[in-house]
Amino acid sequence: MSTRNPFAPPTADLTLSPTDDTPVRKPISVWVMQIIAVLLAAWCSFGLVKLGMLAVAGDVDTRFGVRVLVQLPLQAGFVVMLLLMLWQLPKRSSMGRNIGLGLIALMILILAARILETKANAWPELLGVAIVAFVCLAPLVYWAFAFAFSQKARRYFSASQHA
C-alpha cells in the first residue's frame, strides 16, 4: 500500500515538448517582461549617463548616499543583465528565462521590503499592511509563475531544444 507523499517536491517537466500541429507562440508574460526590460534598460542607461557626468565632475556621493564609483559598476552590470536577457528571450534559452525570473524576484523583494518597513502599531494597521502586501505582491508572484513555469512558458522555452 503506497500513499502519495505530500512533502515530495513537484515533478513538473520543465522541458515540455511542443505539439507538432500548433505553432509555439510567445506567451503574454514574456511580452510583458520584454517591454518592462526595455523600459528599465533605457531608464538605467540614462542614469548611467548622469552617473558618468557626476564621476567626471568629481562628485563622490549620489543623492542616495552611495558612492559614485560603487553605483556606476552596479548599474552598468544591471543594464548588461537586462540586455543579455533581451537578447536571450527571443532565442527561447533557459538563460533568458532564469534572468527574467530573477528580475521578477528582485521586484518582489524590493516591493516586500518597502511594504514591510511600514510601521504598524495596532491590529487594523497591520491588517491594512497585509492587504496592501497581498494586493501588490500577488500579481508579481503570478507573473513569475506564468513567465517561467506555466504550460505555455514551458512549451515556449522548450521549443528551441526541439527545433
Image (cartoon, rainbow, N blue to C red):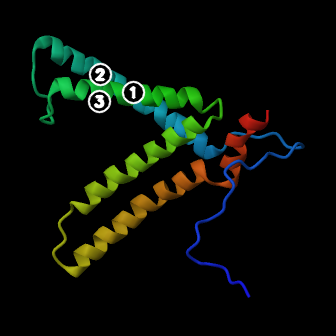
Disc 3 from disc 2: Cα separation: 10 Å
Residue at the spot 23% in from the left edge and 74% down from the top edge: 125
Q: Residues within 10 Å of mark 3 (few under 14, many from 20)?
A: few
Of the two numbered discs 3 and 2 on the same chain, state the one appearing first in sequence.
2
- Relative to 50, does residue 75 appear above or below in the rendering? below
Where disc 3 sits, the SS reads helix
CB atoms at circles 1 and 2 under 8 Å apart? yes
Where disc 2 sits, the SS reads helix
- Relative to 155, does residue 123 appear above or below in the rendering? below
What residue is pinned by disc 2? 48
Disc 1 from disc 2: Cα separation: 9 Å
Q: Which amino acid type is marked by label 2?
A: Leu
- 92 left or right, relative to 34: right
Q: Which amino acid type is marked by label 3?
A: Leu
Seen from the viewer's position, the closer of residues 15 and 84 is 15
Number of labelled discs? Answer: 3
Q: Position of residue 4 (x, y in %)?
A: 66, 80
Q: Residues within 10 Å of mark 1 (few under 14, many from 20)?
A: many
Of the two numbered discs 3 and 1 on the same chain, state the one appearing first in sequence.
3
Residue at the spot 66% in from the left edge and 44% down from the top edge: 27
Q: Residue most toward the right?
A: 21
Foreground mark, 3 or 2, reads 3
Q: Residues within 10 Å of mark 2 (few under 14, many from 20)?
A: some
Q: Residue most toward the bottom?
A: 1
Residue at the spot 79% in from the left edge and 32% down from the top edge: 163
Quarter of the image for residue 67 reads: top left
Q: Which mark is residue 79?
A: 1
Q: Position of residue 122 (x, y in %)?
A: 18, 79
What residue is pinned by disc 3? 74
